[in-house]
Image (cartoon, rainbow, N blue to C red):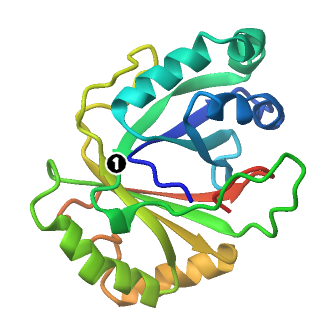
Amino acid sequence: MTFQMVVELRQYRMKPGRRDDLIELFERAFVESQEAYGMSLLGQFRDFDAPGHFVWMRGFDSMETRRAALEGFYGGPVWQAHREAANATLADNDDVLLLTPPVAAARLDLPPRRPAGADLGPAGLIGVTIQALDGPPEPGLSERFEAQVRPALEAAGASVLGWMVTEAAENTFPRLPVRENEPVLIWIGRFADADAYAQHLVRAERAGLGDGFGAVSRRGVIQRLRLAPTARSRLR
């Protein structure tokens, strides 16, 4: 199983018509080659609501192992061989949140990677909800989320796979910028399809969870991502 203590949520805006070009290159060349340096590729997605956006997540055991892994990969032969082709598909790749699960119960629990070409079974819709916080997570947030928010979300039809807050440590690989001074809480859910997700939102609104985090945040700034897993995404 995969338990990562530092996770990057990366949202890329693609040049027109280039999203599938990057996905093909990514899944052929950048999955095992990144994991060889000790990181975990958690999921790759097409954004349902933004045809020009590619979203992906990778995880690390710590901020220090993140630095070593990124230095190794981006200085290594696979990235050097394919970076021009990858960069040619991108309009912007700086929308990156650096996150951490604050308690063990919040961690993503994923099966080991299957070989390329293996049948991973049907993919559902992955929902990622990003909620701005008033400031750093307050004491007791983890307990409130696990005791109040998670059960309410699941009662409204979500399968909550994990949740995270902003990792406040300094970016150990400044060559790749991240969004700084933006405290957030995100949760990741699985749904059978877009209809099931829409029904969840209706139930959540009726239950008083219109922002998804009524028990833990007072701010209303929220982003919802509806994501379609790619062929090799472990989150699916």
Quadrant (top left/top right/bottom left/bottom right) for the C terminus: bottom right
Query: Which residue ends up furthest to the left in the rendered image?
Result: 139
Residue 84 position in % (x across, y down): 74, 10
Q: Taking 16 as reference, is 202 left or right?
A: left
Question: In the rendered structure, which amino acid carries the disc numbered 1?
Answer: Thr
CA neighbours of label 1 inside 10 A, class few (<14), some (14 to 19), many (20+): many
Q: Residue at x 28, y 61 (%)?
A: 103
Q: Taking 28 as reference, is 2 left or right?
A: left
Residue 161 position in % (x across, y down): 50, 68
Visible in this render: residue 122?
A: yes
Quadrant (top left/top right/bottom left/bottom right) for the N terminus: bottom right
Figure quadrant of residue 97:
top left
Q: Residue at x 11, y 58 (%)?
A: 138
Q: Residue at x 37, y 37 (%)?
A: 62
Q: What secondary structure is marked by label 1?
A: strand
Q: Is residue 88 depicted above or below 197 in this figure?
A: above
Figure quadrant of residue 187:
bottom left
Q: How many marks?
A: 1
Towards the viewer: 186 or 103: 103
Q: Taking 25 as reference, is 95 left or right?
A: left
Q: Residue at x 55, y 33 (%)?
A: 38
Residue 231 position in % (x across, y down): 81, 52
Q: Taking 54 as reference, is 144 left or right?
A: left
Figure quadrant of residue 93:
top right
Towards the viewer: 104 or 8: 104
Query: Which residue is labeled 1 in the image?
Result: 100
Residue 170 position in % (x across, y down): 26, 26
Visible in this render: residue 186?
A: no
